[in-house]
Image: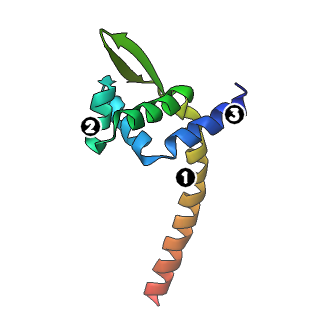
Amino acid sequence: MPRRQAHATVYQAIADPTRRAMLELLGAGEKSAGELGEPTRLTQPAVSQHLRVLREAGLVRQRKQGRHRIYSLQAAPLEGVADWVRYFEQFWDRRLTRLGAFLDRSTAQ
């Protein structure tokens, strides 16, 4: 998969709040599909669909354990997202510093 397309897939995967919640749960350790769907009370097909999107983005890995599939977080694809956010943090830090200075001047008058 081309790099640009891979990045787009990761962004699409984390755009959904349910999938972000699943990634957070996996941050604490491996979970079964049932454990991942339990907090949101999703149907099994809906959980499977979300997990498919996460697998295709390279964000989770699955392994079989008996009749169950166990999922684990693969955080490496999120590095690109973190780099992108860091760029904008610098932008907002500068803007917020200027806003703070403006507000300080305004309240001092």
> Distance from label 3 to label 2 (Cα)?
31 Å
Q: Residue at x 59, y 52 (%)?
A: 88
The secondary structure type at the circle numbered 2 is helix
Q: CA distance from mark 1 to mark 3?
A: 24 Å
- The amino acid marked with disc number 3 is Gln
Q: Is residue 23 left or right of residue 11?
A: left
Task: Return the residue at label 1.
Answer: 89
* Identity of the residue drawn at 60% across and 44% down: 84
Q: Quadrant of residue 57?
A: top right
Query: From mark 2 to mark 1, how far is it between C-alphas?
Result: 34 Å
Residue 21 horizontal/vertical position (percent): 37, 41
- The numbered dot on residue 5 is 3
Q: Compared to 19, does 30 lie above or below? A: above
Q: Position of residue 8 (x, y in %)?
A: 64, 39
The amino acid type, in three-letter code, at marker 2 is Glu
Of the pair 22 and 47, the residue shown nearer to us: 47
Task: List the single residue furthest toward the top.
Answer: 66
Identify whether 31 is placed above or below 87: above
The quarter in which the N terminus is drawn is top right
The residue indicated by pointer 2 is 38
Nearest to viewer (mark 3 / mark 2): 2
